[in-house]
Amino acid sequence: MPTAPKEHTEQPTVNDCFENFIVSTERVFEILGKSPTGKVTFEQSEQGDARRQLLHVEKVAIENKRLQRTSEASYIESISYQLHDIIVEEMSEYLKDTPGVISNLLKLPSNIGMLLDSLTVRACSVSKLEPIVATMPWLVDDLTRIVNTARFRRKDSRGRIIIVETLRTALSFLGIENLRLLIPSLIVKRATPQITDPYPLIKQKLSSYSTGVAITAQHIAIAQGINKSDAYMLGMLGNLGRCAVIRLYFRMFDKVQLHLLQECQKDKEHKRHDALVKIVPSANHLIALQHTFADALTADVLDELALKRLFITPAMRAVAGSSHAQPSVLSDTLSQARLYAQVRALHQTKLTDAKTAKSTLSALKYPQGILAKLKNIDIFTLPLVKSDAED
């Protein structure tokens, strides 16, 4: 659940900065007070209001505020709150339908859990993966495209490039260890929203973050002596709820805005119509909605997948703050991996300094020596290797 609104004296945390970074890099400068004169700071922004609105599930007295405010900006803001009240209500209802979230928002088939389980077992093989992957044309296309890139390209005895056209050959050329990394990544890629205007970089940043968390979790798991495959899977799939919330928000925004515009046209409310046209998706509400729903939704999705060999759902429940879930080494690993990936993403884009990064990371008890090791690892790139063909 969202935390209480921040006091004006409190500085934005690394997590605050990162959540804004996912939406727009410019917003990080704003909340740090480094923006041009006239830009609002974090404390003055509506983000705190958005969280409070969600936390208390309160309805804004739109008409009263409209009567009290005379400026165009205030009027547009009041209409925006009205629009977002409807969006929040409809999203809250929609997200209760987990099977619908999986099929309609994440665009994933019902047997995705079977595929993930198959990747997890030690006896995983091309012959066991092929019939499952074959039921997912989008995954077949992605894997075929990847195996035909320069990185995995092979030549025959005469030096001619082999064009891979069959699924079995693609799986064999890629190899099981690469597939254990690639397939979860491609699942998240499919779930990631592609159209997020006016914040077009969300998909790239979210994809990079998912990889960063997964690779970091894998290395922390090795240091902790726990299953590195479970940690990788949890790190990667732990963003499915975030993907669904973001995609649903933009879908609902368009739907509700269009409905309200049609009402205005019907009732000849020209002023309200003009205000609605000027409203764009709110980064503050988008961040607040992720904060409220994403992790619990991820846990619901993993539960719905009915995983039989991949034991990550309890850890996701614990990270989501469920009162019925006990923290574990695996749930701690996910929290540590997320924080580290956030710090790295901000630091490499010069949005936080080394002192702040060190102070932030010291709040969690990382395994001894792991931070020094991670410093030399490119966590935002999958460590794929060219492998010999497998049967």
Image (spheres, helix red, strand yellow):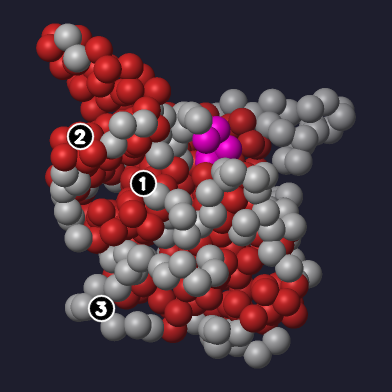
**Tag in front: 2 or 3:** 2
Q: Residue furthest bottom?
A: 368
| Residue 27 higher or lower than 197, as above or below | below
Looking at the image, residue 255 sits to the left or right of residue 243; the answer is left
Q: Secondary structure at mark 2?
A: helix
Q: CA distance from mark 2 to mark 1?
A: 24 Å
Is 234 in front, or is 262? Answer: 262
Q: Amino acid at mark 3?
A: Ala
Q: Mark 2: few, some, or many residues within 10 Å (few <14, many ≥20)?
A: few
The residue labelled by disc 2 is: 67
State the mark number for residue 383: none
Disc 2 versus disc 3: distance between alpha carbons? 47 Å
Residue of label 3: 325
Which of the two residues, 234 or 85, is positioned nearer the viewer here?
A: 85
x, y percentage for residue 351?
A: 69, 58
| Mark 3: few/some/many CA within 10 Å (<14, 14-19, 20+) | some
**242 sits to left or right of 126:** left
Quarter-of-image position of residue 346: bottom right
Which mark is nearer the camera, 2 or 1?
2
Q: Residue at x 64, y 81 (%)?
A: 359
Q: Residue at x 50, y 72 (%)?
A: 10
- Do residues under tags 1 and 3 come within 8 Å of each other at their CB atoms? no
Which range of residues does the magenta coloring cover?
A: 199-203
Mark 1, other Cα within 10 Å: few <14 / some 14–19 / many ≥20: many
Q: Amino acid at mark 1?
A: His
The residue where tag 1 is placed is 285
